[in-house]
Amino acid sequence: MSKYLLLVLFIWGIPSTFFRSKFRKIVYQTDDWKINIKPIFIKELKGLFLNIFPENIEYIKVRNQYRLYLSVYLLLFIIYILIK
């Protein structure tokens, strides 16, 4: 069972680069591809847990999608840890 859950975790992790890239580009207000490899986390975390651009509908939509994605990822990881 844990092998299958590990596989699900791996597969679920694949789109993380897409979600994170889209979210970071909005938070840091850039289209530069280098934002994906920079280890900047403070503003990203504020953007994830707070509402730093309340008037930006795209930001709110992407933030909520990213939150949902990360919540499912966390839930799968907790289940994996508990089963193992």
Image (spheres, grey):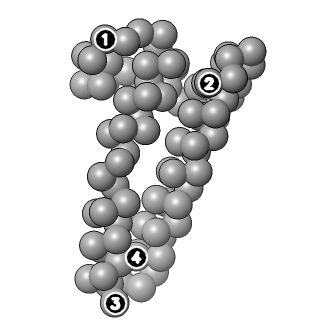
The span from disc 4 to disc 3 (Cα, nearest Å) is: 9 Å
Of the numbered discs 4 and 3, the one sitting upstream in the chain is 3
| Label 2 close to label 1 by CB (< 8 Å) | no
Residue type indicated by callout 1: Asp
Discs 2/4, front: 2
Within-10-Å neighbours for mark 3: few <14, some 14–19, many 20+: few
Observer-nearest of 38 and 19: 19
Seen in the picture, residue 40 relative to 69 is either above or below; the reply is: above
Q: Which residue is mark 4?
A: 80
> Foreground mark, 2 or 1?
2
The dot on residue 1 is: 3
Q: Which residue is denoted by mark 2 in the rendering? A: 58
Tell whether 71 sits left or right of 20: right
Q: Residue at x 30, y 73 (%)?
A: 6
Residue at image location 31% in from the left, 11% down from the top: 32
User: In the shown orientation, is residue 59 left or right of residue 4?
Assistant: right
Using the rendered view, name the quadrant where residue 40 is placed.
Answer: top left
In the picture, residue 10 is in which quadrant?
Answer: bottom left
The residue mark sitting in front, 4 or 3, is 3
Q: Earlier in the sequence, mark 3 or mark 2?
A: 3
Percent x, y of residue 76: 46, 69
3D distance between C-alphas at marks 4 and 1: 36 Å
Q: Earlier in the sequence, mark 2 or mark 1?
A: 1
Please give the residue where the numbered disc 1 appears in the rendered image.
32
- Distance of mark 3 from mark 2, alpha carbons? 39 Å
State if disc 2 and disc 3 touch (CB < 8 Å).
no
Query: Is residue 42 in view?
Result: no
Q: Is residue 17 above or below residue 14?
A: above
The dot on residue 5 is none
Q: Residues within 10 Å of mark 1 (few under 14, many from 20)?
A: few
